[in-house]
Image (cartoon, rainbow, N blue to C red):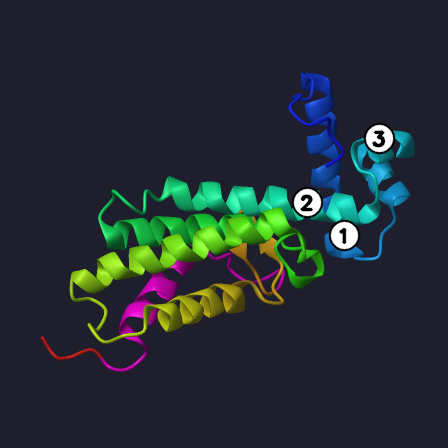
Amino acid sequence: MNRTPGRPLRADAERSVRAILAAAERVLAEHPGATMEQIAEAAGVTRTTVHRRFASRQALVDALATEAAAKLAEAIEDGHPETAPPLVALHRATANVLRVKAAWGFALGPAAAGSEPAARIHEEIARRCVELLGRIQEQGVIAADADLEWVRRVYYALIGEVLHGQPVTACGPVGAATATPLDPDALAARIVDTVLHGVGPRPAG
């Protein structure tokens, strides 16, 4: 983002940046090749305003990726992964992550990869995820000899599969206009159950 180091933006300028980023997500999710002019129009600002805040289209995409990564980190933090009961934290963080990923599909997708600040945030999220899985392992829910990095990758893959190719509403993904919307909390429960217990039959009793 083309800001002067150490100087926070004025409130009106900050609102302008937020409007531009929100518009960029909407426009680029539909048309990944959209121009700065198209994004400016969607944001209700002039092209000059966009160029004043972002030196180039790539700078805008990088800022968008960093903003979305920060939202994802906030979603994880809201689950209190270090202090809440670990299974409760995993469920809440998963539901939160689904909501953020649904809202920031372009910014958290491969087309926006490449922002170093965003990459650092994602690395920290992955570290915290493994730590949370370690707390669950200590409770005996995950096998003592399980590779937690592999468990994390499976967990990430399930989240990605839930969202892949499906339109998402505020209530959750829906495959068609007549389909029943799925609640992120219900999806989170399914993901967590699959990660921890697989799909085999449960032991009797």
- Please state which of residues 107 and 99 is positioned toward the viewer in this rendering: 107
Q: Dot 1 corresponds to which residue?
A: 28
> Is the residue under label 2 in contact with that under label 1 (CB below 8 Å)?
yes
Kind of residue sitting beneath label 3: Arg
Q: In the picture provided, is 121 more to the left or to the right than 203?
A: right
The x and y percentages for residue 162 are 51, 65
Disc nearer the start of the sequence (1/2): 1
- Please state which of residues 200 and 19 is positioned toward the viewer in this rendering: 19
Could you classify mark 2 by the number of other residues whose Cα lies within 10 Å: few (under 14), some (14-19), or many (20 or more)?
many
For the C terminus, the quadrant is: bottom left
For the N terminus, the quadrant is: top right
Kind of residue sitting beneath label 2: Leu
Assign a secondary structure to mark 3. helix
> Is the residue under label 3 in contact with that under label 1 (CB below 8 Å)?
no
Alpha-carbon span between mark 1 and mark 3? 20 Å
The x and y percentages for residue 184 are 44, 53
Q: Dot 2 corresponds to which residue?
A: 64
Magenta-tinted stretch: 176-201
Q: Dot 3 corresponds to which residue?
A: 52
Farthest-out residue, bottom: 200
Q: Is residue 104 visible?
A: no
Q: In the picture provided, is 42 more to the left or to the right than 97?
A: right
Disc nearer the start of the sequence (3/2): 3
- Please state which of residues 17 and 197 is positioned toward the viewer in this rendering: 17
Kind of residue sitting beneath label 1: Leu
Q: Residue at x 35, y 44 (%)?
A: 79
The image quadrant that residue 106 belongs to is bottom right
Residue 193 belongs to the span the image colors magenta: yes
Could you classify mark 1 by the number of other residues whose Cα lies within 10 Å: few (under 14), some (14-19), or many (20 or more)?
many
Assign a secondary structure to mark 1. helix
